[in-house]
Amino acid sequence: MTQAPVQTPRLFRATDPRTGAFVGPEFAVTTPEELDGAVAAAVRAFPRFAAFPPEARARFLRRAAEELRADEEEVVAVAAAETALPEARLRSELARTTGQLEMFAALVEGREWLDARVDKGDPERKPAPKPDVRSLRRGLGPVAVFGASNFPLAFSVAGGDTASALAAGCPVVAKAHPSHPGTSAAAAAAVLRAAAATGMPEGVFAVVYDDGIEVGEALVRHPGVKAVGFTGSRGGGEALVRLAAARPEPIPVYAEMGSVNPVFVLPGATAARPKDVAEGLHASFTLGVGQFCTNPGVVFVPQDRGGDELTERLVKLTKGTPAGPMLNARVCQAYKRGLEELERAGARRLAAGATGEGPNDGVAALWEVALEDLAAARELLGEVFGPSTLLVRYGEPDELPAVAATLEGQLTATVHGEPFELEPGGVADALFQVLVDRAGRLILNQFPTGVEVGPAMVHGGPYPATSDGRSTSVGTRAIERFTRCVAYQNFPEALLPPALREG
């Protein structure tokens, strides 16, 4: 009798984006057996977890926030080594992460998210008795959450997707991003300690690891998974949507995939405040080496004196922009290919920032194209993930609504204008009438980079910004993605969920 060969685990490590050198310990790629075990545990945990009183889930979420804050120094140090993101940025992101957990804890306690509706019966109604019908929202079941490369905390294993899924009563199996496995492990440890301390069922949360895409694909295909949360590239998101749709039981994929976040600068704004607009735009498209999904990649600027001054200021600012390390080699190479594609499509490079010495340094780039050339080269409107933006010079503001109508779905759309341009029936009003069907967040006289974490925020948009334009990954409405509506007809009081009872 021959013994089955022992399978050697596949190991991988994070690399320092600044040097390309390995950092941190080795991590083992999750095996198919381990993945199946994690999902099976989540399936077993779901009925009990979903039945927990809202206050219990709220305690779990708040305790997870406390555990993350207690580990702040370790988490920030590991994340800085794996991502090269500044320490101040990571501390701010950790605060955002804990804030999301606490926001959903408060939401769960309030119970408004259940959207409980009671339609009392009337047995005396003629010609037929009216049944008693009551409905509410309930969690879907285990959720797969994919960690994002550019937000190792707020959109990773303990981020907003995880917080909203857990709040809905859905166990989470999170896939760590291969660029920051150590950060993912540290955040996961805090969540697991919180689960144990608050008496959550075993399997309510788990994290799996991969150095590529195999584990993620298997996770989406697993019959125990009932929904997916993803933040990443358009190609990656669309691949997961196809996988989920091909299952015997198709499931929803809530993927944030890409956006150029157009900015429309009206003539009044360039005439009145070219310096402020230029400085704001520059800060917006270069922040974090341009690695934000809300980075303004296309800016419409008038072909007039104010537009020329704005452009000149942007040229000067861009030339003075230092290079910075991008998140990993793959992201850096994709950015360089994006710049090459802009040039092939006919964009004219106005300025480039300082070059760096690191292997993954991203160099700022400012481009220009005439409005009439835009329609002939739609590839100019593709997302370039990095510190780059394209100025589109237009003649008359009346042209802009028609241009806006040709844009794909976006996460954000911004307009800069002066009071006389913002009156009802004016050009800004006409623009927003179009943009409201093109973007999830409309911005006036501010800049899109950065997302305020609060109940009212919408971080989503029509395809291809997201795979489902009805959803958001930020704000309290995010919980709706991982729920479905259930109606109870003719049930006795004792068998109804507490939120539907009379008392």
Image: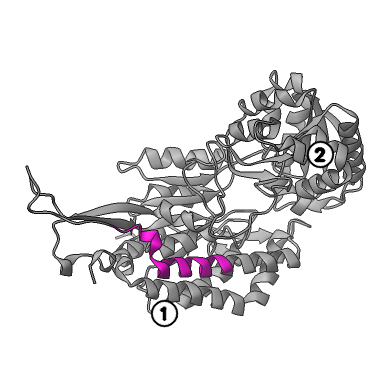
Counting from the top left corner in percent of width and height, residue 337 is at 73, 35
**Side of 290 where 196 appears, left or right:** left
Q: Secondary structure at mark 2?
A: helix
Q: Quadrant of the N terminus?
A: bottom left
**Circle 2 residues within 10 Å: few <14, some 14–19, many ≥20:** many
Is 114 covered by the magenta stretch? Answer: yes
Q: Is residue 372 positioned above or below 71 on the image?
A: above
Q: Read off the magenta span.
A: 99-117
Give coordinates of residue 192: x percent, y percent.
Answer: 47, 73
Query: Does 319 sit left or right of 486 as displayed?
Result: right
The residue that label 2 is drawn on is 269
* Tally of numbered discs: 2
Rendered view: 113 above or below 77: above
* Amino acid type of the residue that numbered disc 1 sits on in the rendered structure: Thr
Q: Nearer the viewer, residue 433 or 451?
A: 433
In the image, 412 versus 345, the foreground residue is: 412
Quarter assignment of residue 440: top right
Magenta-span inclusion, residue 283: no
- What's the magenta bit mostly, secondary-structure-wise? helix
Q: Amino acid at mark 2?
A: Ala
Structural crowding at the residue carrying mark 1, measured as other residues with C-alpha within 10 Å and reported as few (<14), some (14–19) or many (≥20):
some
> Which image quadrant for residue 126?
top left
Residue under label 1 = 198
Q: Position of residue 278 (x, y in %)?
A: 85, 43
Residue at screen point 19% across, 56% down: 120
User: Measuring 73% from the left and 47% from the top, which residue is drawn there?
Assistant: 447
User: Foreground residue, 349 or 225?
Assistant: 349
The x, y position of residue 264, in whole percent, is: 73, 35
Q: SS of the residue at dot 1?
A: loop
Answer with left or right where residue 303 lies relative to residue 255: right
Residues tagged 1 and 2 counted as in contact (Cβ below 8 A): no
